[in-house]
Every structure is written in C-alpha cells, then in structure tokens.
Image (tube, helix red, strand yellow):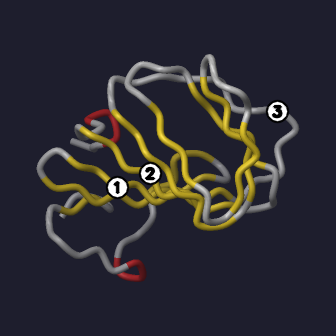
Amino acid sequence: MKSNLIRMAVLKFEEIPAEKVREGLERKIIYTGDLMTVLLDFSDGPWSEREPPHSHPHVQTSYIASGEIIFYCEDEPDQHLKAGDMFAVPPNKKHTIKLLSKTARLVDSFHPLRQDFLKS
C-alpha cells in the first residue's frame, strides 16, 4: 500500500494515516478507475486572506462536511458556504476558498483522477 492511497472499495478512516499537505491541512484519498474522492481537514483557520486561486482540467464537486468557507470561482459571485452545502467547478476554471471557521472538513470528488495527488 502506498501512503494513504489505496485501490480498493473501502477506506476505514482510523486505519489510513492522513497525508500532511502543509501545516493546517491533511488529506485522505480513495480512487478507482477515473473517479477520486479526497477528504480535506483544515485546522488553521480562520484565515485573513483566501488561498491563491488555481485551476485544473478536472471536473470537481465539493461537499462541506463541517466548518464555514467562502468559495470563490472565476466569473461567479462569492459564496458563503457552511456544513451541508456543496459546490461544483467546471474544468479549467480558477477557484479557491477562504476558511472562516477554526476547522473545516471538505469532501472533494474529481474526474478524471488528479494524477498530481498520487505519490509514486
């Protein structure tokens, strides 16, 4: 098994270590075929500034499982989102978030796989 990446139908939260992306952000990933789901845990909020916008060629959907954010998406109005809300991002559209709460959990899904998230 590679780090926290697995190629099976089940990921048990307590059995898979989180990958530290940076201080205040950890993730766990599960993927099969051409679909990837990423659990993101933020613990460094609230932020005074938003993260730098980015884009990618993947379709993305996101579910806010806990916390509050502002979602920014190119050519769209800013959205104040909280637990239970969702957003979608078309391919190649710049987007980002600003964390409003101390912590937040987002569940992102990508199609196709984010190869840049996979460790060799």
Residue drawn at 54 percent across, 23 percent down? 54
Q: For the residues marked 3 and 1, what is the alpha-carbon distance in whole angstroms?
A: 26 Å
Figure quadrant of the N terminus: bottom left
| Residue type at the position of mark 3 | Glu
- Binning the other alpha carbons within 10 Å of mark 1 as few (below 14), some (14 to 19) or many (20 upward) gives many
In the depicted structure, whether residue 5 falls above or below residue 17: above
In this rendering, the label closer to the viewer, 2 or 3: 2
Question: What is the x, y in percent for residue 99?
Answer: 75, 47
| 13 sits to left or right of 96 | left
| Residue bearing the label numbered 1 | 37
| Residue bearing the label numbered 3 | 49
Q: Earlier in the sequence, mark 2 or mark 3?
A: 3
Question: What is the x, y in percent for residue 67?
Answer: 72, 62
| Residue bearing the label numbered 2 | 108
Question: What is the x, y in percent for residue 94?
Answer: 54, 21
Q: Earlier in the sequence, mark 3 or mark 1?
A: 1
Relative depth, front residue between 13 and 72? 72
Relative depth, front residue between 44 and 56? 56
